Amino acid sequence: MTSVSRLRRVLATSAIVASAMSILTGCASSDDSGDTIRFALDWTPNTNHTGLYVALQEGFFSDAGLNVEVLPYNNTSPDTLVDAGNAEFGTSFQDSATFSRAAGAQTVSVLAPLQHWATGIGVKADRADIASPKDLDGKTYAGFGDPGERETLRQVIRNNGGTGDFETVVLGTSAYEAVYGGQADFTVSYFAWEGVEAARRGTPMRYFHYTDFGFPDAYAIVVNGNEKWLAEHPEQARKFVQALQRGYQVAADDPDRGAQALIAANPGVFSDEELVVESQRMLAADYMKDASGRVGNQTRELWAGYSGFLYEHGLLAGPDGKPLTTEPDWSTYFTDEYLATP
């Protein structure tokens, strides 16, 4: 899920409004400073946000003396809100965070809830004619119109010996149904949501993981902060990031506890609560922890891999809208300085 659109769920408006009301009501703390830290969601609540809801439900923010307000998704990307100072932090993705900062956004990643790609190429399990990515040459891709998605897929296919030539139809959230129904041949699925959902609904899929075919790994999810606010509020920033990190660590170490916090904070949103539990278990098992078992850390090496690919393929533009001609210093795109000391 390098883009949020890959896991967007079609939810009833009433459920979204109810969720937003419950979130905003539940975020108040005893903080007397009057300062509020605003966190922008990238979509309606889902397992990408479990650590946030653990921190809210279990009082990690209030214990740190912080008043945290969750801003419901409103068609404006969190990167835009954080850059503009309309939110102090927000959920993002390595690709969108890279595009935004390259274009001049005053944002920096302060925590990585998911340490690896959580998306991959999905085809119906019964497609005997598609055994590996090279078999996607000449096929139809149901996509999302995200910057970089086509070049990523082309490279994975080429790494497997194909030409990387395929047709693209931009369908958004209808992409999955198009593949399930045979109107398209492949899409990009989020393993811990569409993948689980497809299996539960009886439309099993087969997946090709990018890194199995020589493509660099990436942080599927990051949390961006506003650089100016961080510089002006270092102590609040540290307390917030560490409370959030603690929430994600709990969700990684005890996924059922994390799933229940997410469900409890958003009554009426999830029609299939077991899907939430399965999703969180998968993320906890395979995606949230680094080699040491910690959640949140970032490295220049991982940022340079995928973000460097975007640069090398001429996909990054600067503030003037022109392609970058000098590779960025990827160490400036993230910071671990606010994380808890191991």
Image: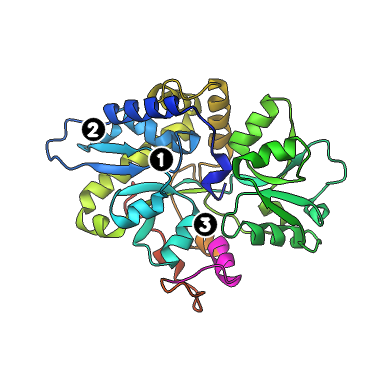
- When the figure is inspected, residue 102 is found, relative to residue 24, above or below; the finding is below
What amino acid is at disc 1? Tyr
Q: Residue 317 in magenta?
A: yes
Is 189 above or below relative to 108? above
Tag 2–tag 1 contact (CB < 8 Å): no
Question: Looking at numbered disc 2 in the image, what kind of residue is underneath it?
Answer: Asp
Residue nearest the viewer, comparing 220 with 337: 220
> Which mark is on residue 24?
none
Label 1 sits on residue: 73
Residue drawn at 27 percent across, 31 percent down: 27
Judged left or right of residue 58, residue 209 is right
The residue where tag 3 is placed is: 95
In the rendered structure, find residue 63 and report the number of the disc placed on it.
2
| Percent of width and height locating residue 229 | 25, 55
Task: Name the N-terminal-most of marks 2 and 1.
Answer: 2
Q: Confirm whether the magenta stretch covers residue 89.
A: no
Q: Which residues are magenta?
A: 305-318
Residue 50, can we see it? yes
